[in-house]
Image (cartoon, coloured by chain):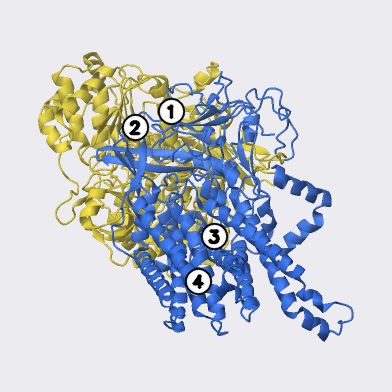
Chain colours: A yellow, B blue
């Protein structure tokens, strides 16, 4: 063997020099991976690694988590509060004290002039649960606006609404451990390898240990579709038709679980009547899946026992989003696949703490799945917070998407925008821009100063990010886990919790509403509100969460007191008959008629526009666009375009094209791939001034979630490629 | 010593399984015999003298990649870059895509590759500085950036782009197999990070649990017979007949039904229009190679003609000692120095130039450098002697030293013997250096160069340009005679004819080659289509003119001027094409990362100004004289002696 050198030199390898590791939960998606951040001798965050004995990720991290410590020193962080009279003025630096005065006066001035609900508070799924809870208390209990929502309306609202309609409450019944028990998994519009890589790892690991068939329903040939046993290239928007047709087959061949239906559901007759109209022959012409395949898949799922469904934005971001979720629930209910090991409808959530905001932010009601519409809930919380229950509205207010429509009409004149960036993330951003232009007061609270929405702010609060803060998050499988402050916020930035508490002091002048300062103390307060409810967390504390690497709810004080250790995983909901959250304990089977109420390609706009995520990016790229080892895998906006379509139009790989919809236009680089059908383009939504210039603000009637996944565009060749390249570059600073 | 955590998951830990004794090419998997003194030594990682007790330490290890499972999630790449603290534009491991079929019957195959730690590492053999070592421990091929001078030759010869030249730092670095993790029983960082259950690691030829095959290639992986790589694959999913690259390379991989292997073929993605692309052609970082090869060949050709043929051919002999003699030798010397300086300054660490001899034992680059150095010494001696003979007597008398130095010595026959000796030194240098200058471009991983066209081009340039230099210098002195024109234009025509014949054969052989050569030919005739045509036209015109002058040498001396111009222009264009159109056998890139088209675009448009785009500009590096002086000061004579010895012993 050739060794090359007779004299071996010593080996030098790079060392990050971490001397201490601190525990946190990842701040990107909803998987809930547990991370340790390594600190060097000077206390700088220098490394990230997965916690090996955490059941969620078992030591693994995705491309974002592996470099997450680089966030702390990323470009564009806000270092001090700033204000200005009008958004067109230059910023001037100010003190926190003055900034809070500005916030208080701005909110009260707007409310005095235009009414109580003329101030919007819009938050996010990105903060920690104690922060949501405190903000909810401040907004519902002291500010008193009913124009309060979060960006979760853009990602999870349809799942929430679908769960509520079917089961009487939000709350995903399944968990990751189901992959180890299921005999059939259907993934509806969910591309785990790209969107939730570590959940995919759990799936793949389980499947390699014990095979089960994987069926993927997606209009695009995704990484998950490639790994599927059966791939259903569905026509966009027609999930409900496929679901109805599958149920048609199940009923026709008597494959349903009659005992389970009898003991657990209402509405079977209405459902049977509706799905009778969807024989596979008729359905196949609408949804694009041939009738034999529909039958095969329906039988496979019905006979699997247990069979499982997961879904993500392919279902949720649609005018039939909530219906699609109900359809999945229907399928699971009639086959007895709810709350069983390996049998559940498990919504794969979006943001790291989307679940936390669903449970605790009060945006969709009151804490812990309480509703403003229920008097008892208003009284309970009023008592707990020491707020007059009559101060609460009796009906929940508009969702984020509706708030913007009201704002555009000049009915909302002030806004407190927290850790979200609607200028990039809402559909049809031309209208979002108009809505924000006319605001008289706008406070943007964010860890970055360079979010596009900040251009319309008159007040800026620099918040902390991720593990600069302390608190908990809830993941897709209802696991609560803790984030420890690993490093300090830069400059004068402060954790959002600190900001909310200081802001509350300005509104809480009589001091009658308690606002605990520390996250761990707030958690104790939340525990009390959860006692005896579906999401009971009375057995947990920050210390126990870290000790057990996160605990799935429910985990009660009684369980803890009896010495019952929280299980590593595998906690499910509705495991016993008739334990659903409707008063009679039964789930509803809801018939789903199908109408085409979304934009469909035509001669003028002949391509489906499908938007979605890339594994290396997060949301509007304010984080990942600045971290080289994320950003470099897709540094500029691009479309996936079918090579046959491109050839007909004379478009070559790597050329910039102009996309035109009925709303506006956008420039992106064409990347040719057969992963998309000939009449579809896929456009990642991460890039500012791109995808959402084109998307349509059609909303789901129940969840008010936008139909990002169904709109129509045409594609135009660009003659001057250089100009297009420079334009594309100019349109974003990172 | 790498710090193991209290709890490490099974997937991250090496297992001690029985292994085979020999790999599929008959190479022993035990790297050294049981009682070899190389066993039991510390790897001295970061100054730690600890010796690992890993039971398989002296077995060849390698990566195992299940191509069916890879989801291109980039976790392996990020884990690797974090472990090695690489900046965004630089990475040891990359994932590329190849794709085939049509919707919805599509296969996108993702390939994650770092280094194959080959049995026969081309990088190690190619490196002129001896920066590479294959360790008996794990069979790891490691490279030391502190030795490297940044010539990038290893990146040319490796068929898999494992070694990476960092354009910012100016040195190469590469996958180090995470030997620090292996020492404590852990698999490399990329393997531990794999999300899709695709990447694994262990003693080579061992098939991991749950896998049934150990193949040596997948579509897109260059042929394994060049270096005997130690990566094994499992790829069972049926693939379409054509798998195309998604990056800008005009290549697809086509299934050969007999062998089942996928061979590279042309994929004419950008049509067949001709372009000039002159900026790309002449403005690249490779233009120092154009300057060096042409000037060195010109000087070598001219020297060989004058110093060797000048002793036998009358028209040339007549020039000896004439007014053009010294200027000709000076011109050769100046041109050679210019080329060498240009080449040296293109190095990432030009002040480490002296390390170019370290790899004399294996590296064709070191051998070429050695040969060119010998030629330089010969030429310099020959030139110095000519100067002494021309001016020695005059200088002595001018200084009034006539009583002390016998001026007669300057005319002594021994002086002629000395001249022959210097000529011999120069010619030996030309033969040795020239041979290895050709050899170093005959790289299996670069089919465009691995053709006798390279030999012909280099010899042809030496003849065509080398013959014209004496003519060009003689012209203003009025020393150009008809016989001289016949001899030298003849030599030039011979060189041009050789180049022309090679060009025809090259085009014929490349056009339909089942290799990246076909893609090179495509680039040459489309992206560089007009320069290619122009060059061929210039070559033909130069050849006709040169032949014309051989036949009718008295046709008019003014015809020499267009001949000079045509020959020089065709040589520069030809050599520029030689460097610009070469397409190495590379691993496929992805949409943006490791996509040569995007890299070029990002540099053109200024996206590369943002470091997080992951593209760095190429630029020249300073000759740090201070660093060189420090090395001189801090190196003891003993070390110099030891280093010199190792030039020959390895």
The residue singled out by tag 2 in the image is B260
Q: Is residue A138 above or below residue B484?
A: above
The residue singled out by tag 1 in the image is A202
Q: Residue at x 86, y 82 (%)?
A: B402
Residue furthest out toward the right: B403
Q: Earlier in the sequence, mark 4 or mark 2?
A: 2
Q: Residues within 10 Å of mark 1 (few under 14, many from 20)?
A: many
Q: Residues within 10 Å of mark 4 (few under 14, many from 20)?
A: some
Residue A604 placement (x, y as % from top left): 16, 57
Q: Residues within 10 Å of mark 3 (few under 14, many from 20)?
A: many
Subunit ID for the residue under disc 4: B
What's the distance in space between the residues labelled 2 and 3, CA to CA? 65 Å
The residue singled out by tag 4 in the image is B487
What's the distance in space between the residues labelled 1 and 2, CA to CA? 34 Å
What's the distance in space between the residues labelled 3 and 1, CA to CA? 43 Å
The residue singled out by tag 3 in the image is A81
Have a look at marks 2 and 3 and say if they share a chain: no
Give the structural element (helix, strand or loop) at label 2. Answer: loop
């Amino acid at each position: 063997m050739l060794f090359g050198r007779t004299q071996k030199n010593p080996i030098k390898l790079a060392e990050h020099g971490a001397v201490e590791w601190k525990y946190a939960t990842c701040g990107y998606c909803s998987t809930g991976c547990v991370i340790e951040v390594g600190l060097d001798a000077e206390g700088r965050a220098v490394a990230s690694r997965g916690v090996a004995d955490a059941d969620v990720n078992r030591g693994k991290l995705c491309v974002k988590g592996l470099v997450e410590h680089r966030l702390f020193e990323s470009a564009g962080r806000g270092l001090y509060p700033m204000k200005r009279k009008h958004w067109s003025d230059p910023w001037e630096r100010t003190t926190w004290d003055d900034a809070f005065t500005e916030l208080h006066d701005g909110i009260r001035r707007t409310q005095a002039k235009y009414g109580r609900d003329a101030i919007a508070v819009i938050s996010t799924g990105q903060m920690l649960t104690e922060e949501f809870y405190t903000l909810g208390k401040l907004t519902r209990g002291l500010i008193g606006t009913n124009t309060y929502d979060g960006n979760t309306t853009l990602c999870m609202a349809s799942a929430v609404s679908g769960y509520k309609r079917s089961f009487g409450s939000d709350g995903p019944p399944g968990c990751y451990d189901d992959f180890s028990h299921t005999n059939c998994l259907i993934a509806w519009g969910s591309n785990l390898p790209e969107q939730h890589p570590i959940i995919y790892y759990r799936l793949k690991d389980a499947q390699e240990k014990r095979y089960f068939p994987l069926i993927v329903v997606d209009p695009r040939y995704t990484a998950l579709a490639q790994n599927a046993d059966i791939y259903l290239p569905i026509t966009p928007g027609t999930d409900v038709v496929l679901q109805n047709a599958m149920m048609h087959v199940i009923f026709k061949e008597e494959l349903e679980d009659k005992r389970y239906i009898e003991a657990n559901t209402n509405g079977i007759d209405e459902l049977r009547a509706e799905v009778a109209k969807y024989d596979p022959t008729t359905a196949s012409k609408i949804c694009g899946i041939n009738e034999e395949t529909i039958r095969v898949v329906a039988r496979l799922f019905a006979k699997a026992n247990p069979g499982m469904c997961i879904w993500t934005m392919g279902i949720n971001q649609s005018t039939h989003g909530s219906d699609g979720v109900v359809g999945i629930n229907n399928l699971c209910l009639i086959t007895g696949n709810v709350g069983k090991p390996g049998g559940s409808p498990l919504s794969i959530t979006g943001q790291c703490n989307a679940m936390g905001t669903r449970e605790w932010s009060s945006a969709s009601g009151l804490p812990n799945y309480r509703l403003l519409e229920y008097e008892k809930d208003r009284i309970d919380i009023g008592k707990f917070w020491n707020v007059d229950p009559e101060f609460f509205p009796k009906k929940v207010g508009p969702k984020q998407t509706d708030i913007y429509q009201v704002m555009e009409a000049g009915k909302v004149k002030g806004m407190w925008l927290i850790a979200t960036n609607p200028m990039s993330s809402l559909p049809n951003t031309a209208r979002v821009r108009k809505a924000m232009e006319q605001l008289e007061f706008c406070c943007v609270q964010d860890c970055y100063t360079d979010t596009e929405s900040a251009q319309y702010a008159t007040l800026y609060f620099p918040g902390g990010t991720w593990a600069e803060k302390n608190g908990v998050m809830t993941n897709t499988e209802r696991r609560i886990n803790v984030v420890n402050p690993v490093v300090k916020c830069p400059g004068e930035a402060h954790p959002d919790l600190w900001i909310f508490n200081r802001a509350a002091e300005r509104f809480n002048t009589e001091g009658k509403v308690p606002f605990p300062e520390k996250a761990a103390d707030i958690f104790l307060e939340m525990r009390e509100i959860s006692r005896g409810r579906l999401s009971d967390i009375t057995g947990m504390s920050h210390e126990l969460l870290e000790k057990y690497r996160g605990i799935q709810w429910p985990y009660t004080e009684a369980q803890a007191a009896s010495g019952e250790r929280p299980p590593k995983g595998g906690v499910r909901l509705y495991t016993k008959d008739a334990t659903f959250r409707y008063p009679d304990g039964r789930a509803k089977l809801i018939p789903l008629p199908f109408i085409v109420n979304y934009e469909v390609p035509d001669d003028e706009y002949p391509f489906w526009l499908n938007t979605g995520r890339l594994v290396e990016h997060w949301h509007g790229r304010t984080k990942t666009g600045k971290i080289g080892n994320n950003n470099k895998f897709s540094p500029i906006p691009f479309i996936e375009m079918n090579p046959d379509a491109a050839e007909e139009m004379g478009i070559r790989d790597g050329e910039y094209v102009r996309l035109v919809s009925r709303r506006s236009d956008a420039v992106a680089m064409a990347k040719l791939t057969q992963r998309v059908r000939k009449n579809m383009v896929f456009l990642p939504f991460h890039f500012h001034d791109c995808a959402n210039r084109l998307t349509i603000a059609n909303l789901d009637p129940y969840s008010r979630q936008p139909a990002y996944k169904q709109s129509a565009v045409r594609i135009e060749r660009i003659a001057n490629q250089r100009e297009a390249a420079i334009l594309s570059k100019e349109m974003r600073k990172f | 010593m790498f710090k193991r955590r209290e709890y490490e998951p099974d997937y991250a830990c090496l297992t001690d399984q029985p292994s085979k004794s020999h790999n599929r090419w008959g190479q022993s998997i035990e790297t050294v015999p049981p009682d070899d003194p190389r066993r039991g030594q510390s790897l001295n990682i970061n100054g730690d003298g600890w010796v690992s007790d890993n039971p398989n330490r002296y077995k060849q290890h390698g990566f195992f990649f299940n191509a069916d499972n890879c989801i291109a999630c980039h976790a392996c790449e990020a884990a690797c870059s974090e472990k090695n603290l690489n900046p965004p534009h630089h990475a040891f491991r990359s994932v590329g895509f190849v794709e085939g079929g049509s919707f919805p019957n599509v296969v996108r195959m993702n390939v994650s590759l770092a280094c194959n730690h080959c049995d026969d590492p081309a990088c190690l053999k190619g490196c002129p500085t001896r920066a590479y070592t294959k360790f008996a421990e794990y069979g790891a091929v490691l490279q030391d950036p502190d030795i490297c001078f940044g010539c990038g030759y290893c990146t040319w010869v490796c068929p898999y782009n494992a070694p990476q030249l960092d354009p910012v730092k100016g040195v190469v670095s590469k996958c180090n197999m995470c030997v620090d993790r292996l020492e404590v029983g852990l698999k490399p960082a990329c393997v531990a990070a794999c999300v899709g259950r695709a990447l694994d690691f262990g003693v080579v030829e061992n098939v991991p649990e749950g896998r049934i095959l150990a193949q040596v290639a997948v579509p897109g992986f260059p042929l394994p017979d060049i270096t005997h790589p130690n990566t094994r694959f499992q790829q069972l999913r049926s693939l379409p007949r054509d798998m195309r690259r998604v990056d800008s390379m005009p290549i697809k991989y086509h299934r050969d039904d007999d062998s089942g292997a996928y061979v590279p073929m042309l994929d004419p993605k950008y049509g067949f229009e001709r372009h000039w692309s002159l900026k790309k052609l002449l403005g690249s970082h490779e233009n120092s190679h154009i300057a060096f090869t042409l000037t060195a060949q010109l000087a070598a050709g001219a020297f060989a003609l004058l110093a060797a043929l000048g002793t036998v051919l009358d028209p040339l002999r007549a020039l000896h000692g004439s007014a053009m003699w010294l200027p000709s030798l000076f011109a050769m010397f100046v041109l050679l120095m210019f080329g060498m300086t240009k080449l040296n300054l293109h190095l990432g660490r030009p002040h480490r130039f002296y390390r170019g001899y370290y790899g004399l034992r294996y590296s064709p680059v070191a051998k070429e450098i050695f040969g060119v150095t010998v030629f330089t010494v010969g030429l310099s001696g020959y030139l110095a002697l000519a100067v002494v003979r021309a001016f020695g007597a005059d200088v002595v008398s001018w200084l009034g030293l006539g009583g002390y130095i016998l001026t007669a010595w300057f005319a002594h026959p021994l002086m002629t013997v000395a001249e022959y000796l210097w000529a011999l030194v120069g010619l030996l240098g030309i033969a040795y250096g020239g041979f290895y200058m050709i050899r170093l471009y005959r790289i299996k991983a670069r089919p465009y160069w691995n053709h006798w066209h390279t030999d012909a081009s280099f010899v042809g340039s030496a003849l065509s340009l080398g013959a014209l230099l004496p003519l060009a210098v003689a012209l203003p002195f009025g020393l150009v005679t008809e016989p001289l024109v016949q001899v030298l234009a003849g030599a030039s025509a011979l060189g041009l004819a050789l180049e022309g014949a090679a060009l025809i054969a090259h085009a014929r052989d490349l056009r339909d080659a089942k290799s990246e050569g076909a893609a090179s030919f495509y680039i040459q005739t489309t992206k560089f289509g007009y320069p290619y045509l122009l060059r061929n036209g210039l070559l033909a015109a130069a050849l006709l003119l040169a032949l014309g002058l051989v036949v009718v040498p008295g046709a008019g001396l003014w015809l020499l001027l267009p001949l000079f111009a045509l020959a020089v222009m065709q040589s520069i264009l030809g050599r520029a094409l030689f460097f610009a159109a070469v397409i190495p056998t590379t691993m496929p890139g992805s949409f943006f990362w490791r996509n040569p088209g995007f890299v070029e675009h990002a540099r053109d448009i200024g996206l590369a100004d943002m470091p997080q785009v992951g593209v760095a500009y190429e630029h020249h590096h300073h000759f740090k004289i201070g660093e060189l002086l420090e090395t001189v000061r801090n190196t003891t004579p003993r070390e110099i002696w030891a280093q010199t010895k190792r030039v020959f012993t390895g």
